[in-house]
Image: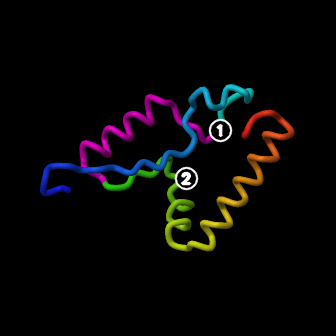
Amino acid sequence: MAHAGLHFTAVHPGNVATPIFQALAAPPPDAISVEDAVDFILDAVERKQAILVFPESSRKLIEDIRRDPEYNEQVHCHLADERRHNYETKGTYY
């Protein structure tokens, strides 16, 4: 699509301090502000970056998941189990 002037950026954000965390006392310690997330995204779009992963702490996890389908399955099953348990015991996914 680049030949037609269209470019796409896939965004893989880590924790961003949004209302999704309102049930918690505070966002996770690695959460970045919405303003910082917007800056990262707009910068990547302007540079026509194909894939954006932030914060940096999330990069290795995303790379491992993309490289190893079995690991991908394990990570997502673990997240689903954890979130299901949290929802049943805390009323929130986190």
Indicate the secondary structure of the residue bearing disc 2.
helix
Q: Amino acid at mark 1?
A: Pro
Q: Are marks 2 and 1 in contact (CB under 8 Å)?
A: no
Q: Which mark is residue 57?
A: 2
Residue 12 in the image: x percent, y percent? 47, 50
Residue 6 in the image: x percent, y percent? 20, 49
Residue 46 in the image: x percent, y percent? 24, 42
Q: Range of the magenta residues? A: 29-49
- What coloring was used for the rendering? rainbow
Indicate the secondary structure of the residue bearing disc 1.
loop
* Residue at screen point 62% across, 31% down: 20
Label 2 and label 1: CA atoms lie apart by 12 Å
59 vs 31: above or below: below
Which residue occupies the foreground of this view, 65 or 80? 80
Which residue occupies the foreground of this view, 36 or 80? 80
* Residue at screen point 55% across, 52% down: 57
Q: Quadrant of the C terminus?
A: top right
* Residue at screen point 76% across, 51% down: 82
User: Is 90 colored magenta in this rendering?
Assistant: no
Residue at far right of view: 89
Q: Amino acid at mark 2?
A: Ser
Residue pointed to by mark 1? 29
Q: Which mark is residue 85?
A: none
